[in-house]
Image (cartoon, rainbow, N blue to C red):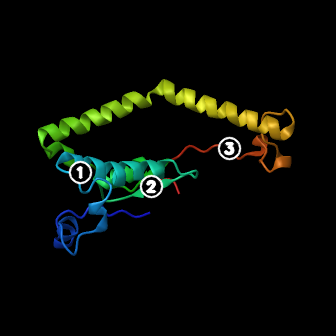
Amino acid sequence: MFSAGHDLGSSEARAEREAGPQQHPTYTVNGGTRHAAETRMLQEWHYFFRNTLRWRDLRKVTVAEVHGRVYAAGLMLMWACDLIVAAEGTEFAERIAGTDTMAALLIKESVNQSVDNMGFQNALNACFSLHQLNHAHWAERTGGYPAGTPELGVPAWSEAPPVRPARRHAP
């Protein structure tokens, strides 16, 4: 997946938003014909929020590899991924500091609410539940043993290589 962010200022972007022959069809559906804040709310809910959730809910591990400046839509796509790898020098949403006061307060509040809802206890409970479900899965497959075995294609844990600590500048 690649995202270069929003194109908000070019003449092509303006032509896609405004009524006329160059208007992109997405500006006439999913709330596009509503008025004032309702239009933006419905359009952003559909095209940004719901699409981000669809990426998050993929049944495969997703990895975001980011570099340069990561703002707005890039942040939304990145946050939906299971693993985020950032190049040195990557900038994340530093524009918030210079943002309108109300917008900055709302951004801060959305982050605070998200962190509050993610909570350490909830994360542990979720991991434990999935861990136990995995034991149940293997117990069903093996006739009672609650883990995968080499006979089922799962490498033996006792033969695994030693865990090496990650080092930033190690080859």
Task: Residue 151 in the image: state x and y as whole percent.
Answer: 86, 48
**Of 162 and 153, the residue lying toward us:** 153
**Of 28 and 59, the residue lying toward us:** 28
Q: Which residue is rendered at x = 58% and y = 50% of the image?
A: 59
- The residue carrying pointer 3 sits among few (fewer than 14), some (14 to 19) or many (20 or more) residues within 10 Å by Cα, namely few
**Of 68 and 1, the residue lying toward us:** 1
Q: Is residue 2 above or below residue 162?
A: below
Task: Residue 86 in the image: state x and y as whole percent.
Answer: 40, 53
Q: Is residue 126 left or right of residue 84?
A: right
- Mark 3 residue element: loop
**Of 15 and 67, the residue lying toward us:** 15
Quarter assignment of residue 68: bottom left
Quarter assignment of residue 160: top right
Which residue in the protein does label 3 denote?
Answer: 162
Which residue in the protein does label 1 denote?
Answer: 39
Task: Residue 45 in the image: state x and y as whole percent.
Answer: 33, 48
- Mark 1 residue element: helix
Q: Amino acid at mark 1?
A: Thr
Q: Is residue 55 left or right of residue 75?
A: right
Pick out the residue farthest to the top. 121
Between the residue at mark 3 and the residue at mark 1, the CA separation in whole angstroms equals: 55 Å
Which residue in the protein does label 2 denote?
Answer: 64
